[in-house]
Image (spheres, rainbow, N blue to C red):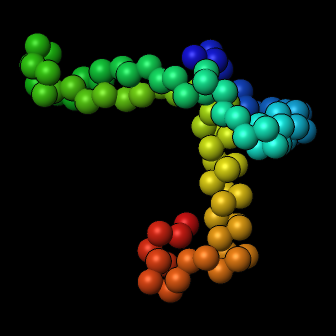
Amino acid sequence: LDKLIPEFFRESISILSPYLKTLFNRCFDLGVFPKKWTVGIIHPLFKSGLKDKVNNYRSITLLSVFGKIFLSVLEKRINNWMQEEEKLTESQMGFRK
């Protein structure tokens, strides 16, 4: 993965924001999503009970911070476009954030 933690981005967003904007806009313009941003590491997380029973674990997937931020920006852009263009009907209100 990218070996970055989300807190790094939260704490330095004012500095990183123009660079991320340039990077993400370039990705949008070129229609690319870097392959590294799609890779995840599945990690078993123990819940409770006997540690030798597979059902006592759940999995979490660690993803690229860049990929998660990019997808969040993309989701906001799509939602804004759908609202501006009135692409969602009243019956689809439950799917809006």
Quarter holding the C terminus is bottom right
Q: Quadrant of residue 13?
A: top right
Q: Residue at x 79, y 38 (%)?
A: 30
Q: Quadrant of residue 60?
A: top left
Expressed as whole percent of the image width and height from the top left, the position of residue 77 reads 71, 58
As displayed, is residue 44 above or below residue 32?
above
As displayed, is residue 30 above or below residue 51?
below
Give the side of residue 52 with respect to residue 92, left or right: left
Q: Residue at x 63, y 47 (%)?
A: 72
Q: Nearer the viewer, residue 8 or 1?
A: 1
The answer to whether residue 13 is visible is: no
Q: Nearer the viewer, residue 30 or 17?
A: 30
Give the number of marks: 0
Expressed as whole percent of the image width and height from the top left, the position of residue 59 reads 31, 28
The answer to whether residue 61 is visible is: yes
As displayed, is residue 83 above or below residue 63?
below
Give the side of residue 9 with respect to residue 14, left or right: left
Give the side of residue 59 with respect to residue 87, left or right: left
Q: Nearer the viewer, residue 19 or 92?
A: 92
As displayed, is residue 78 above or below residue 13?
below
Q: Nearer the viewer, residue 91 or 17?
A: 91
Q: Residue at x 66, y 27 (%)?
A: 34
Expressed as whole percent of the image width and height from the top left, the position of residue 82 reads 65, 70
Give the side of residue 31 with respect to residue 45, left or right: right
Expressed as whole percent of the image width and height from the top left, the position of residue 68 reads 60, 37
Work out which residue is located at the far front of the displayed protein and give it. 30
Work out which residue is located at the far bottom of the displayed protein and give it. 90
Quarter holding the N terminus is top right
